[in-house]
Image: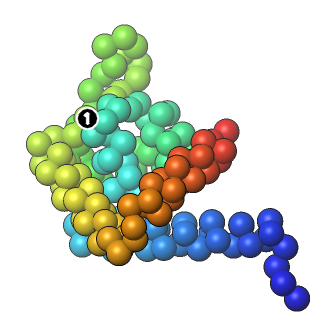
């Protein structure tokens, strides 16, 4: 029996997620990080997020963020700074070493994905980009 179109969509999206998750896991492990730590560093590179913002971005409880930040801070990859507008909140900032590690992680992901899709014609890659942008928008709450 053939899968229903909605079932096929769900299975395909889950398959894409698994593959991307595997690439993230491999790249992060090569740098001695967990995938969640690598994601946190990437968010900190662009946003200087608070702990609450990180919890939302990483889809986890705020109590998990403290441990993640503590481990990355011990490694010298980030620091905490009081929010200039609300001193009750701390913001996470990358150190120069954290910037370098984050750049390495992003370059590894970029190289891997670019290589995997290099045989695709540009029109097919452009279509994929458009579809994935639409899918990302549809998945956001």
Q: Quadrant of residue 10?
A: bottom right
Badge 1 marks a residue whose secondary structure is strand
Can you see residue 90?
A: yes
Left or right? Give the position of 84 relative to 6.
left
Q: Residue furthest top?
A: 85
Residue sitting at the far left: 96
x then y, percent, for residue 130: 52, 49
Residue 73, given in percent of the width and then of the height, sits at 24, 46
Q: Nearer the viewer, residue 137 or 22?
A: 137
Judged left or right of residue 11, residue 59 is left
Q: Residue at point 40% right, 13% down?
A: 86
The residue wearing badge 1 is 93
Exactly how many numbered labels are in the figure? 1
Q: Which picture quadrant has residue 14?
A: bottom right
Q: Quadrant of the N terminus?
A: bottom right
In percent of width and height, residue 105 lies at: 25, 59
**Is residue 75 shown to the viewer in this render?**
no
Visual colour scheme: rainbow
**Which class describes the residues within 10 Å of circle 1: few (<14), some (14-19), or many (20+)?**
many
- Residue at left 27%, top 51%? 72
Question: Residue at the location (46% across, 67% down)?
Answer: 20
Percent across and percent down for residue 135 are 61, 50
- Nearer to us in this view, 75 or 110: 110
Q: With respect to residue 112, does 41 lie above or below?
A: above
Of residues 3 and 23, the one drawn nearer to the viewer in this rendering: 3
Residue farthest to the bottom, as pictured? 1
Quadrant where the C terminus is found in the figure: top right
- The one of 87 and 15 positioned closer to us in this rendering: 15
């Amino acid at each position: 029996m053939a899968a229903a179109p909605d079932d096929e969509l769900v299975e395909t999206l889950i398959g894409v997620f698994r593959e991307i998750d595997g690439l993230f896991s491999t790249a992060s492990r090569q740098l001695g990080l967990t995938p969640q730590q690598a994601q946190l560093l990437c968010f900190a590179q662009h946003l200087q997020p608070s702990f609450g913002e990180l919890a939302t971005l990483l889809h986890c409880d705020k109590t998990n963020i403290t441990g993640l930040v503590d481990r990355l801070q011990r490694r010298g990859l980030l620091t905490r700074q009081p929010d200039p507008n609300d001193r009750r909140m701390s913001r996470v900032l990358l150190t120069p070493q954290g910037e370098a590690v984050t750049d390495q992680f992003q370059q590894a992901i970029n190289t891997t994905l670019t290589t995997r899709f290099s045989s695709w014609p540009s029109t097919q890659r452009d279509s994929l980009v458009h579809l994935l942008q639409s899918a990302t928008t549809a998945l956001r709450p």
